[in-house]
Structures are given as C-alpha cells and as structure tokens.
Amino acid sequence: MKKKDVVLIKRDIYAEIIKAAKHLFNEVGFKKTTVADIAHELGMSQANVYRFFKTKAEINVAVCGQIFSEIEAASEEIARDSGPASKTLRNLIASVERLNSLRFHEDPKLHELLQTAYDENWLIVREHSKKMDKILEGVICQGMAAGEFRAGDAELAAILVGSACMRSWLMVQRPRDPEPTTDQMIDFCLSALV
Amino acid sequence: MKKKDVVLIKRDIYAEIIKAAKHLFNEVGFKKTTVADIAHELGMSQANVYRFFKTKAEINVAVCGQIFSEIEAASEEIARDSGPASKTLRNLIASVERLNSLRFHEDPKLHELLQTAYDENWLIVREHSKKMDKILEGVICQGMAAGEFRAGDAELAAILVGSACMRSWLMVQRPRDPEPTTDQMIDFCLSALV
C-alpha cells in the first residue's frame, strides 16, 4: 500500500468516526454517548477509535467543528455572490439562521452539544466566531468598495452586525470574542436610527 | 392603631424581608439561603416571614423585582431628559450597562439570581424587558417627533435597539419577548450601514 493510500484511509476512518458520533449524539445525546458506543456503531475496537481521538472530549469538539464547517462553507459560498452587498449580507445571515433553526428543531439533541460548547466557551466556538466575522467583513468590504455602504472600519462593522444579529447564530447568546464595546454598539444603533 | 399605620408597617416588614434576603443572597447565594436564615437575620419567626411570602421562590422573585425596579427607575429618570434623544438613548443604555456591570463585579452572588431568572425565563424578567422596551420607545418617539430620528415604528425600533444592545443588559443573552424577526434585525443592521 502506498503512503498516499494510507493517508486517505486514515482520513476516511477519521470522518467515519465523526459521522458515527454525530449520529449517536443525535440519537441519545452527546453526554450519554461513550467511545465504546461509537466503536460498536462502526464495528471497530475502542483502541482503534483512540488511535484517532485521544479522548471523548476530542470527538465532541470534532463533531462541533464539522457542524461549524458546514455553516462556514455555506456562508463562504453566499459571500462569493457578485450581486449587491446588502443582498448578500441578508442572504448570508438568513442562511445561517436557517441552518441553526433547522438543527434546533430537527436535531435537538445535537443542538445540546453546541449549547454546551457555547456555555463552556470552547476554543472551537471562538474560532468559528472569528471565521464568521471574517466572512461578514469580506461582504461589507465589497459593499464599501462599491460605494453601497458608507466607507469605514469593515472589521468593526462585521463584529457589530454579527453581534446585533447574534440571537440567530446558534440561538444561543453568550459574550462574543471579540466583543464590541457598549459605545460601539450604541453608535451602530444610532446610525441605524438617524 | 389606625388601619393606615398597619398598612405602613406591613409595607416596611415586606421591604425589610426583601432587604435581608438580598443581603444573604449576596453573602451565601440565593440557593443556599433558607427562609429560616432570612427570619433569623431579622430576628423574627419563620411563620412571620411566611405571612408575607408564601414560598422561598416568591422571595427570590421579589429580590429580582427590586433590582429590576432600580434599573427601571434610573432609566425613567434619564428618559425624562429634555436634551437630544440620541444623547438620552446613549445615557440610558450606558447607565443600564453600568448598573449591571457593577453588580456583576461587586455582587457576583446576587448576579447568579438574575442569571437563573433569565435562564429559567421567569415572568418578572419578561415584564422587566417590556418595561425597558417602553422606556426606550418613549425616547425614540421623542427623537422622531423632533425630527432627530427618521419617522417610523418606534415600538419596533425600541425592540431592535434593546435587542442589538442586549449583551449589556444583565450580561446574559437569552431570547427576548417580544423577539424581532431575523428580517427586522437585518433591516436594522443594513440601515445602520447604508
């Protein structure tokens, strides 16, 4: 077997473990799912699962990361639209809200994992927030370059928009990282009003 | 003793129980404080406390309500300012943030009570949200009448401003009642950008 094939197979097993874990998390909840359950679901030994993930906590993070990756990929796809930035921004936020709402209603047990990740402020949550801020920033930059949005600090604008619209993002609301100051948030609200 | 005096004394005892409970909640936490502790603090019998509050849960709500009342009173005071509405709005939101931040840092155990009230979506939290929305609405109405703000739906604008600035309000973020739709929230963000 060539080295490349081994890498490919390893990647497949990695993905299969995440897939099986996600399935079980959705069936019985992530807290009740053991590594033994995941191994059993895949017909492999626990030792084999532990070759890919050192702890159950690592599997939790990987499932979380996969869900976030899907949201990021869908958002990046929308962000590439060439239409007006306001339309792209609206589509992007609505799409994230739809994905989260869908999971919340159809996969409530899986949503519990994300709720816990937010409540405990896992690193992957902060990384996801930063990636989403970057995607928003790109759209806002386009709008500013096209003269559609008032020129200004696109990075801050992205944080403000994400922050103001946050109740849709995962339907959980915890302090974000980075966090806009109260003054920045009020300025934003005022500029929407005036 | 005249009837009026009895009413006054009753009101005083009621206030004293809330004061003692608040003190103990801040010392040992609201979950660890018993009705017996509160009675002991006041040098009265448990039976006497129960004449004013049927359950410990009612005392929790009353302490919460007192904290909310203080925030509402401070906000109403600011809302009466005759200066520009944008200045009043900024002062109002900054004042609420300051009061919450102060409690969070100086009375962390008392803050736990409010966190629980929000987490469990107590009726008093929803009532407080509605009162704060009304105060915001009054300020926005003034700004609209003076031509300082674009004319429009002041009630909705109040919900949007409160919603967007919510991370300051008690530093906890849970779905609000009433909840703006995603579309309304996006419209708001866009009008701040364009």
Image (cartoon, coloured by chain):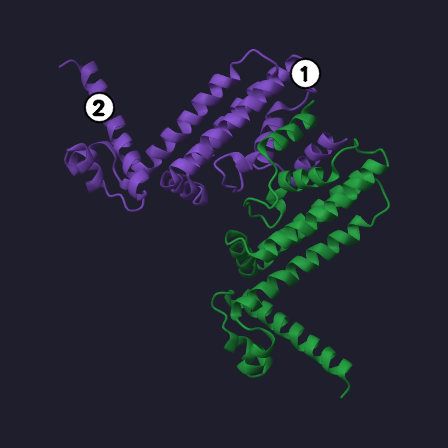
Chain colours: A purple, B green
Q: Is residue A101 left or right of residue B89?
A: left
Q: Position of residue B9 (x, y in %)?
A: 71, 80
**Which kind of residue does numbered mark 2 sit on?**
Lys
* Residue placed most toward the observer, A78 or A141: A78
Chain to which the residue tagged by mark 1 belongs: A
Residue B41, disc: none
* Residue placed most toward the observer, A143 or A156: A143
The residue at which mark 2 appears reads as A10
Whether residue A178 is visible: no
Above or below residue B74? Residue A136 is: above
- Which residue corresponds to the image point at 68% horizontal and 78% vertical from the top-left? B10
The residue at which mark 1 appears reads as A148
Whether residue B13 is visible: yes
Classify residue A27 by image quadrant: top left
Q: Position of residue B133 (x, y in %)?
A: 69, 46
- Which residue corresponds to the image point at 28% horizontal and 46% vertical from the top-left? A32
- Which residue corresponds to the image point at 34% horizontal and 33% vertical from the top-left? A63
Above or below residue A40? Residue A15 is: above
